[in-house]
Amino acid sequence: MLQWEYDPSDGEIRAIIEFPLEDSILTEKQFHRCLSGLIQIVDSIAIPRLKEVMATGFDPGNIELGERLLLSIQEEAPGLLDLLEKAMEARKKRGSFKSE
């Protein structure tokens, strides 16, 4: 529902909602629900994340994204993370994989 737009000409970032309406009209109830959701997401997620980036120079969202990705892999493909971990360890031992 929520999307972020970036304007490279001035660096502005905007939170937007696109309404997937084809042959119908947007109702007042739908509009208020979307507006409320937009405000809630920006206030509870975007602003705290932005403040953290400004204060520390690091994006905590990248860590959260990685954790969500690992959880998703674990749920969708049980055992795959163990396989990936073993493969990464094998590459490290061969010296063909450099971790940062």
Image (spheres, helix red, strand yellow):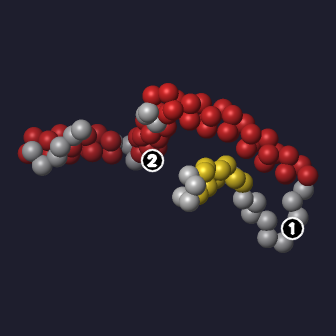
Crowding around mark 2 (Cα neighbors within 10 Å: few <14, some 14 to 19, many 20+) is few
Q: Residue at x 56, y 35 (%)?
A: 50
Numbered-mark total: 2
Furthest residue to the left?
94
* Residue 33 appears in the rendering: yes
Residue toward you, 3 or 6:
6
Above or below, 56 against 77 in this view is above
Q: Is residue 3 left or right of residue 39?
A: left
Relative to 26, is 47 above or below?
A: above
Mark pair 2, 1: CA separation: 36 Å
Q: Is residue 64 left or right of residue 96?
A: right
Residue at the outermost front position:
10
The local secondary structure at tag 1 comes to loop
Q: Give the amino acid at mark 1.
A: Ser
Residue 16 percent across, percent down from the top left:
70, 53
Check whether the beta carbons of the residues at disc 2 and disc 1 lie within 8 A of each other.
Answer: no
Tell which of 16 and 23 is nearer to you. 16
Badge 2 is on which residue? 76
- Residue at left offset 60%, top offset 51%: 12
In this rendering, which labeled residue sits more in front, label 2 or label 1? 1
> The C terminus appears in which quarter of the rendering?
top left
Q: Tell me which residue sits at (51%, 32%) in the image.
A: 54
Rendering coords of residue 95 (x, y %): 9, 45
Q: Which residue is mark 1?
A: 24
